[in-house]
Image: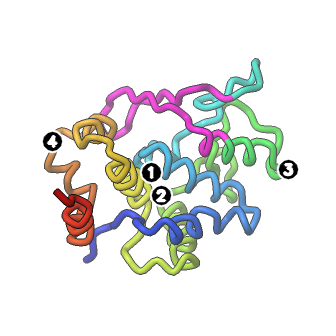
Amino acid sequence: MSTTQPIKDKTALENFKNYYLAKQNFRNYSLIVTGLNTALRISDLLSLQWKNVYDFSSRCFFKHIRITEQKTGKQSIIAMNSSVKNSLSILLNSKSRCPRLPDDYIFNSSQNPQMPLSRYQAYRIIREAASAAHLEEPVSCHSLRKTFGYFAWKEGVPPAMLMNIYNHSSYQITKKYLCIEQDDRDEVFLNINI
């Protein structure tokens, strides 16, 4: 059985991310964008409701998503960047399934709009986009979380900060998430010319 991998190629990542936008399936597009930019586990991502991200009285997005992680029971506060806000805004303003209510799930089931997508359906959505983007590495729901960490690490975010973001109990777990391979090691050696 293969281990889920982060998506490391930026062009493939853009194709993966925008697959559903091109198809005007805004729920699936926003699911992927939000997952890539928040590092949430799929169970926490699917449990998000509009009241977690949007202030209906002020008609604006919150600056942060505040949730209690299902796996760890820890409070998590995640800044919503412009990519997340833009994708959620597209979804919020789309004509399908309007009006949105605070208790509605953001990523709701097509069969039962009062329920969130199932983990299996989220997996199928991600696999379809990965296939369309011609991604060969094993890609699953967890790839969204791992991709966030990989690109954060490449941008110079210290591993200790990623450990904190992921709420990991050990640095060893975080190291596995980063999926550092020989080509990453080679890049370090080739860029250091003393």
Local packing at callout 1 (Cα closer than 10 Å; few below 14, some 14-19, many 20+) is many
Q: Is residue 46 above or below residue 18?
A: above
C-alpha separation, residue under disc 1 versus residue under disc 2: 7 Å
C-alpha separation, residue under disc 4 versus residue under disc 3: 45 Å
Nearer the viewer's eye, disc 4 or disc 3? 4
> Residue 171 vs residue 73: left or right?
left
Nearer-N-terminus badge (3/2): 3
Q: Which mark is residue 95?
A: 3
Q: Which mark is residue 42?
A: 1
C-alpha separation, residue under disc 3 versus residue under disc 2: 25 Å
Circle 4 sits on which residue? 170
- Residue 81 sits inside the magenta stretch: yes
Name the residue at the front extreme.
194
Nearer the viewer's eye, disc 1 or disc 4? 4
**Residue 49 location in percent, x, y?**
60, 36
C-alpha separation, residue under disc 1 versus residue under disc 4: 21 Å
**Which amino acid is tagged 3?**
Lys
Is the C-beta separation of discs 1 and 3 under 8 Å?
Answer: no
Which portion, as a residue range, is magenta? 61-85
**Which amino acid is tagged 2?**
Arg
Nearer the viewer's eye, disc 2 or disc 4? 4
Q: Secondary structure beneath disc 4? A: loop
Local packing at callout 4 (Cα closer than 10 Å; few below 14, some 14-19, many 20+) is few
Nearer the viewer's eye, disc 3 or disc 2? 3
Q: Secondary structure beneath disc 2? A: helix
